Image (spheres, rainbow, N blue to C red):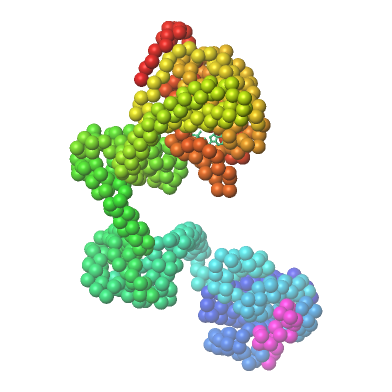
Amino acid sequence: MTTTSSESSHLQERGIPAGSHMVQFSENDTSLISAVSAFVGAGLRAGDACLVVATQSHRESLEQRLQAEGLDLAAARAAGSYVPLDAATTLARFLVGGEPEPTRFRATIGPLIEQAARDNRHVRVFGEMVALLWAEGNRAGAIGLEDLWNEQGRLQAFSLLCAYPMQAFSGHAHEAQFVHIRDQHSRVLLPESYSQLSEEERQRAFALLQQKAHSLEIEIAQREAVQERLRVLAAIVESSDDAIFSKDLAGIITSWNSAAERIYGYTAEEMIGQSVTRLFPHDGQGEFDEIMARIRRGERVAHHVTQRVRKDGTLLMVSVTISPVKGESGAVVGASSIARDITGQRRLEARSQQLFASNLIGIFVADSLGRLLEANQALLDLVGYSWEEWQVAALTSPLASFVLPLMEDAGGAASVTEPQETVLRHKSGAELPVLVAVTCLEDREACIGFVLDIRERKALEQRKDAFIGMASHELKTPVTSLKGFLGLVQRLLADLPDARVRHYLTRMNVQIDKLTALINDLLDLSRIQAGQLVYRREQVAMDDLVAEIVESVQETTQTHRLQIEGRSRAEVFGDRDRLGQVLINLLTNAIKYSPGADRAIVHLSSDGTQVLASVQDFGRGIAREHHRKIFERFYQVDEPQEKTYPGLGIGLAISQEIVKRHGGRLWVESTKGQGATFHVSLPRFQRGRQPSNGSREEIP
Ligand code: ADP
């Protein structure tokens, strides 16, 4: 059915174009009923037929209103111009699986409209079925039904008014749906409050609405930003390692984060609504009152160190900062607390203090410039000063100059340097031999130093040195005589026909030479200790010296071939015999510590200032941790499961001393199991710089 032009003009006279599909967004039931009664009332008065598909309560309210306006509904109903229908029942007739089914819809609605349109009456329909679907949350169903009504409008002429409660679209999420519903209708009716306004008032109301909408949008954006900030803050509070909680002025807990649960052992449910004094030890009421009095005055209580009780009854040491929380009026309404569990830290501090105060080891703390910041009693007792006296810069500086390089030596945090020997001065002026090691604190801003008194060890060493000196001296004379007499005997018995006697005498001679070498080493060592080793000074051609020594050491071995590689073509200035002694020592070690090898090499080279002789072997090698120590007196690498080698462990100490006295350096490069190379680097003799050629002076 289509609308004729006469019909449409007839409808337009009533302000409703034929076939219009209107929507009423109502603010409440009253405004809805007003709008519907205006729509239906005007229709009935104009002789239109009106179909009202509404809920029972809306139908009743509508009928009351229409009757109050003087309309005879009973007559209209009898004439078929007022047709009330129940929205839910009608909807059920064409709903399949929650969706309005098009054929059924047409079969239900089509005849109703056709019936109403008898006698050429125009038909008005008020439908609430879409609103029902919408209220159930069936948005797709409602939108689908609106489309079916629009399709029906193309088949039959009728005016349709749909109604939705405005609050059904509250919130941003429904904005798009609102626009969709609005677009499905040819007209949108304003709520009654607006429709009754004059044009001027309406424009003003419209402007006001726009302004309100704009401020609302701004407010919503601000609220969202605040909410976002709150979410971030809440996440920070939750992830904090410190207990964070709030309380009102009576001390009642109002919030409780997960660190608080962990530290105090109570869950948020157990604590919120409870007094904070639950965490205080028995006598804590006074402390609570004192804190709250300060909070009420608007003061902050910072880093308050105190005791609290966990749920399991254990005592905790905490550092708490409590700040007043102000309400909108600016008055203090409660307090926030941030508490850190410092029980472990305090325990550690107490232990460190105990260690520091121990009277066995001297301990000091120095800053990055090596200046003393603290010293324990053991160290003060050792040096005989009071702390105030020892702080005087002049007294501490010797330690500073010693500590600084040590600090540089110390690797990463927590690693301790190798202990080093040094001498402190006692208040009495006496020298104090000590061992010092340092460990740097994490930021390297300071270090902790450990000082060990080694006076007794030194005294013992001196007695040992004195004994070695005396014993070797006492042994030297009889062994020298023995060697002399043996020489005599050898000469006297040279013509004896029995060769065995000569053989034994030669063997005796070899053994006496070994004994003499040992005694000489010991004598050298004690002379070095006493600073009495005498060096001659002469020009020494290195290549000749090395060739000579290699030749003589070669005679002592049948297992190893000794090779020389390279030439230095240089001279050094010093004691030829002592330098020879160094080479002999290195070569005999190279043979001794490479029992499985068959050669050793002496590499010779020089540059403008240095002459380098390096003795390389292919033996057992030396692990890195021994590289420094093997140059100490009596130090021998003692590896379990390895064979032992004869020796006193003093050859390298003597060699080191000799090389040092020549202004040179002796060091080793080696990896365990891969042979070793000992390098001797000596200053090259340069004419004009040293005493004149050929002079043989003896100096102490
Ligand atoms: P000694 O050889 O009499 O023990 P040294 O002072 O000459 O004493 O050497 C000290 C220690 O260094 C030796 O005991 C040995 O452990 C180690 N050492 C020296 N030279 C070598 C080498 N060439 N290969 C492996 N280890 C060596």
- Residue 668, how many percent across, how many down? 53, 32
Q: Tell me the quarter of the picture where residue 602 sits.
A: top right
Q: Is residue 95 magenta?
A: yes
> Looking at the image, is 108 positioned above or below residue 586?
below
Residue at image position (58%, 45%) is 642
> Looking at the image, is 383 positioned above or below residue 490?
below
Residue at image position (26%, 36%) is 431
- Residue 643, how many percent across, how many down? 58, 44
Give the camera-side residue of 420 and 626.
626
Can residue 368 be seen at all in this image of the molecule?
Answer: no
- Residue 590, how many percent across, how many down? 58, 31
- Residue 622, how many percent across, how many down? 56, 38
Q: Is residue 389 magenta?
A: no
Give the camera-side residue of 398 and 572.
572
Can residue 76 be seen at all in this image of the molecule?
Answer: yes
Q: Quadrant of the C terminus?
A: top left
Residue at image position (45%, 60%) is 236
Residues drawn in magenta? 78-100
Give the camera-side residue of 7 and 225.
225
Give the camera-side residue of 195 and 456.
456
> Looking at the image, is 112 positioned above or below residue 662?
below
Q: Tell me the quarter of the picture where residue 342 sits.
A: bottom left
